[in-house]
Image: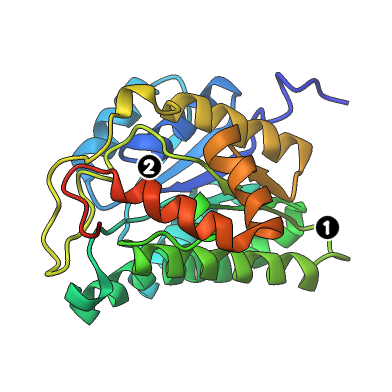
């Protein structure tokens, strides 16, 4: 049996949203483990920079907007054309939002669902036949917002809940076929996601309302996800206070958690609610 150090050697790992944040850190983590990479994002310049950084790794970069079904099909087709197999698909691409629902244009909610939920569905649909052949892994990077509704982020929570439900159902459908499905939920992680989060009118927020210096790093998050893939875990909830404790309280004391969540989120600078 291969050691953990070499278990991912030559495995083909497809990562969406690979141009920054957790996606970029995942590419670096699996490169260290000897994997062959297929990196997808809309920003080709960022992907090209990352490909140069990982010059010792076999890497294919594909410009991909995961909200477009044809882009997702093309991503998987190119991965197979290049490497002939897929061992891991990591659905990481995602966007966030920050706005009261009453002040949010419905097009913003649709965009959140198109990228976060439908992007996962599209990529998983086209990768699944190849993952069943390799008895590989589908990973969905959700959020604690996929376990508890975050005020001011209705579309984000909705999309992450939807991802979790879809992936859990997919696991059960394929439980006798050797498919591994991991739902990974980071807590607040230092990345660009808050800077590019959408406001109620669809424009970018532009700056983070949180102190990111105290958050989990994208690199630590990527390490934990890679470790969970190797162990073929079902769920990965990261951080204690904002992760495991939140999910625990949600099961036993849901009304208390609602109040704690409201008060916590209301403390953000320029919070849309008080």
User: Is residue 103 shown left or right of residue 247?
Assistant: left
Q: Position of residue 54 (x, y in %)?
A: 39, 23
* Residue nearer the viewer, 11 or 262: 262
Q: Position of residue 29 (x, y in %)?
A: 52, 26
Q: Which residue is mark 1?
A: 178
Q: Quadrant of the C terminus?
A: bottom left
* 41, above or below 49, in the image: below
Q: Give the structural element (helix, strand or loop) at label 2.
A: loop
Q: Which residue is mark 2?
A: 18
For the residue carrying disc 1, how many other residues have a C-alpha within 10 Å: few (<14), some (14-19), or many (20+)? some
For the residue carrying disc 2, how many other residues have a C-alpha within 10 Å: few (<14), some (14-19), or many (20+)? many
Residue 18 in sight from this viewpoint: yes
**Which residue lies at the image location 69% right of the left edge and 59% below the top edge?**
251
Residue 85 in sight from this viewpoint: no
Q: Quadrant of residue 230?
A: top right
Colour theme: rainbow
């Amino acid at each position: 049996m291969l050691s953990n150090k070499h278990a991912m050697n030559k495995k083909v790992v497809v990562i969406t949203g690979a141009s920054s944040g957790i996606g970029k850190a995942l590419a670096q983590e699996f490169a260290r483990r000897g994997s062959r990479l297929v990196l997808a994002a809309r920003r080709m310049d960022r992907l090209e920079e990352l490909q140069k950084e990982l010059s010792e790794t076999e890497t294919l970069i594909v410009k991909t907007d995961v909200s477009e079904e044809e882009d997702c099909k093309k991503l998987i087709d190119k991965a197979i054309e290049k490497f002939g197999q897929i061992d891991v698909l990591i659905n990481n691409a995602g966007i966030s939002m920050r706005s009261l629902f009453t002040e949010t244009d419905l097009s913003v909610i649709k965009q959140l669902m198109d990228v976060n939920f439908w992007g996962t569905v599209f990529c998983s649909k086209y990768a699944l036949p190849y993952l069943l052949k390799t008895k590989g892994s589908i990973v969905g990077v959700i959020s604690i917002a996929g376990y508890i509704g975050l005020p001011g982020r209705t579309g984000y929570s909705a999309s992450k809940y939807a991802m979790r439900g879809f992936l859990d159902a997919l696991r059960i459908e394929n439980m006798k076929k050797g498919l591994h499905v991991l739902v990974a939920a980071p807590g607040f992680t230092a990345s660009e996601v808050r800077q590019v989060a959408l406001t109620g009118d669809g424009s970018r927020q532009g700056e983070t309302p949180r102190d990111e210096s105290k958050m989990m790093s994208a690199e630590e998050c990527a390490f934990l996800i890679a470790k969970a893939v190797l162990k073929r875990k079902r769920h990965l909830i990261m951080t204690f206070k904002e992760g495991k404790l939140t999910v625990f309280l949600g099961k036993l004391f849901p009304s208390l958690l609602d109040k704690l969540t409201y008060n916590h989120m209301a403390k953000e600078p320029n919070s849309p609610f008080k």
